[in-house]
Image (spheres, grey):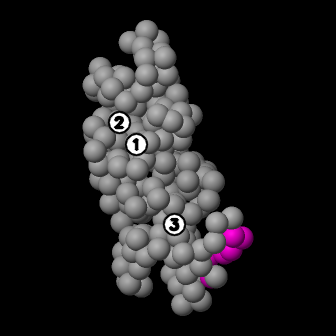
Amino acid sequence: MSVGEIVQHLAIKVFEPPLSNLLDDLRSVPEVLRIPILLIALDTEVMMNGMLGFLENSTGLYLVDTIDALEAISAHKTADTLRTIQRIMSDHGVTVEHFRRNVNSGQLHEITNFRKTHGEELVPMAKQIDGEARKLYIYHYHSGENDRPEPVFDLLETYLEGRRVELVAALESVASPKWTGSAAVR
């Protein structure tokens, strides 16, 4: 498998055991595997639930780590956007942990919205975050050569290309050879 194919495979399998178990403590995962997992989690969560959904989800607890991962692969524009979102939250006295506490205090399977979960006073902050998030590559549709979205997953593949052996070893250490398809990823 190419590095791109490994990343695609990882994107499909990261939310299933045994890899989903890593999401509980990503800081203990080797960097070569942690970085793609963080970026896949960001991409998936923002695509499915928007930036506020990412911040409310347990993967949002890794906001700083995600910014660091983006910097590591040279996705500076995306990292800057997340830093701005982090600053917006800070300006309103809010942390990701604050979001998680509010979400966790709700009832299981409860149908709710941001206003009900976090309060009316944070709605202006949510609007600011949504506006800033529109700068992300996920939402960025270019109209010309000078207006291109940052190629985050191309940058990730370039970053991992020289670390392929280490990436495969990390995958094999946390997943069964059957899952990784050892022969296929070599």
- Residue 62 position, x and y percent, is 37, 57
Mark 1 vs mark 2, foreground winner is 1
The reply, left or right, for residue 166 in relation to residue 107 is left
Q: Circle 1 sits in a helix, a strand or a loop, which is it?
A: helix
Q: Which residues are magenta?
A: 110-115
Q: Which mark is residue 33?
A: 2
In magenta segment, residue 121: no
The mark nearer the N terminus, 1 or 2, is: 1
Q: Residue 71, can we see it?
A: no
Q: Residue 112, can we see it?
A: yes
- The amino acid sitting under disc 2 is Leu
Disc 1 and disc 2 in contact, CB within 8 angstroms: yes
- The amino acid sitting under disc 1 is Leu
Q: Which mark is residue 22?
A: 1
Q: Which mark is residue 56?
A: 3
Q: Circle 3 sits in a helix, a strand or a loop, which is it?
A: helix
Which residue is found at the position 46% from the left and 12% from the top? 184
- Residue 14 position, x and y percent, is 50, 38
The mark nearer the N terminus, 3 or 2, is: 2
Estimate the spatial distance between the alpha carbons at disc 3 and disc 2, rounded to whole Å.
23 Å
- Residue 77: image quadrant is bottom left
Which residue is found at the position 40% from the left and 61% from the top? 61
